[in-house]
Amino acid sequence: MTDLVIVGAGPFGLTLARVLAERGRRVTVVERRGHIGGNAYSSADPDTGIEVHNYGAHLFHTSNQKVWDFLSRFTDWTGYTHRVFTVHAGQVYPLPVSLATINQFFGTSLSPDQARGLIAQQASQDPQDGPGYQVGAGGQAGTGGQSAATSAPTADRHKAADDPSLSLDAKAVRMIGRPLYEAFIRNYTAKQWQVAPDQLPGSVIGRLPVRYDYDTRYFSDPHQGLPCQGFTALWERLADHHLIELRLGEDYLGASATAGPFTKASCSGQVPVVFTGPIDRYFDQSAGPLGWRTLDFEWEHPATGDFQGCPVMNYADLDPAWTRIIEFRHFHPERDYPPDRTVIAREFPRQAGPEDEPYYPVNTPRDRQRLDRYRELAATEPDVKFGGRLGRYQYLDMDMAVASALAMAAEMLA
C-alpha cells in the first residue's frame, strides 16, 4: 500500500517524496530510467575516476535560503563558483557580458558609466536602421561620432525591455545592443535551441545578467557550490527514508507487463499521483507534441591533465557545430584526479524526437497554444498533480525545482 505515487526521481520528485515521508506519508517513486537524480545524475568515469555529469553540466546556485537549508541537510558543499568563457572569431571572452567583455570586445577601456552609455545607445538604435557603431579615438566608443557617455534609455524603453511578449532577440538587443548580441547570443542561441531566436520567449535571455563591473561570475546568488560527494550522493540521501520506496526501471506510462505494478492504467482513480514527466506524453500528445530540446554528447579522454583550463567553454559562432565543451575535472579542483588524463564532452543540442530524453521546453508560440490545452486537460484529471520542469513545461533551475516541490508538499500537507 502507498499513500502517493510520484512519477520521476529527479530533484523535484525526490524533494517532494522526502518532505512527505518525514510527515508520515508512504511514498512510492517510479522512475523509468535505472538511476535517480533525473538529468542531474552524476557518476565516476570508469577510466579516470573523474566525476562526470552524464546529462551535461549541472551547477547548484540559489538565493532561496529555505532551499539551501533543506538541501544542506543532505550534503556539504564545495566553494565552487561557476565561470564561463566563450570563443568568438578566434578570441576567448568571459561570459556573461560584463565590463571585461565590453572592453575586450570593443578594444576600449571604458568606465562603468561610459559602458552603460554605449550599451544604452546600441540598445535604442539598431545599426541595421542607422549609422554603424564604431570605436573612436582615445578608447571612447560611440555611434556616428557621438560620445558614449549619453543618457540612459527613457522610461518607455525600460518598459519595453520588460515586456513579457518580447521575443528573445528583441529582448537581447534591448539588454546588450546588437553588436554584442550578434557576437555572443544570436548564433549560439540558434545552435542551442534549433529555433530562430525571434520564435523564443524573452524569458530565456532574461536569466543572463549584464554587469558593468569586472565580476565574471556566471551566477550572482549568495549560495553556490557543488555537493562534496557528488550529485548522486545527494539524491541517494534524499531518497534514504523508510517510508520511500524507489522503483527504478519502471515506466509509468508503459502498457506492457514489464512496466511494473504502478502504471497510469492501474493508478488512475486508485491513488493520488504527482507526475513529473512530459505533460504532453501523459496525455498521449492528444493536443499535438510540445517542442523539447535534447542533447547529444561526444565524449573524449585527452591525454593531458588540463584540456581547456576551465569547466565550460562556449562556442558562440555557427562553426563548430557544438555549443560548448565541458571539462569535468575543473568542477572539483580539490580532488586528486589523474595528472595526465582528463574527460571532456562536446555538447550538440537538437530537437527531441519521440524516443529522446527531453531536456528543455522550447516554448514557441505554437507550444504555448498546445500547453494551454494540456493545462485544461490536467485540471480535469482526478487526483493527479503535475510538477517539475517536464510536468510544468517550464525551464526550472535545480533550486527552482526544489522550491516548487517544497511548495507543493506544503500545499498537500495543509
Image (cartoon, rainbow, N blue to C red):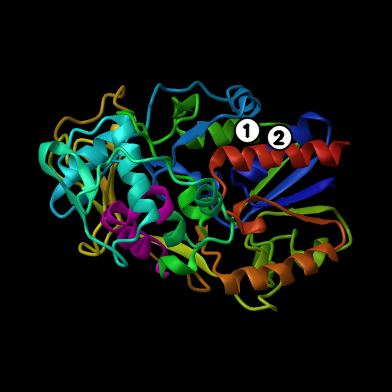
Is 49 situated above or below 40?
above
Magenta segment, principal secondary structure?
helix
Foreground pick, 145 / 34: 145
Image check: 366 left or right of 129?
right
Q: Report the magenta residues as a range.
A: 173-195
Q: Is residue 361 above or below residue 196?
A: above
Let me know if residue 97 appears in the view.
Answer: no
**Mark 1–mark 2 contact, CB under 8 Å?**
yes
Give the x, y percent position of residue 31: 62, 53
User: Where is mark 1, residue-wise?
Assistant: 238
Helix, strand or loop at label 1? It is: helix
Q: Nearer the viewer, residue 78 or 64?
A: 64
Whole-Å distance between the Cαs marked 1 and 2?
A: 6 Å
Q: Is residue 132 visible?
A: yes
Hey, what amino acid is under mark 2?
Answer: Arg
Q: Earlier in the sequence, mark 1 or mark 2?
A: 2
Callout 2: few (<14), some (14-19), or many (20+) C-alpha neighbours within 10 Å? many
Would you name the residue on which mark 2 appears?
Answer: 18
What kind of element bears circle 2? helix
Q: Pick whichever, 333 or 132, lies toward us.
A: 132
Is 174 a magenta residue?
A: yes
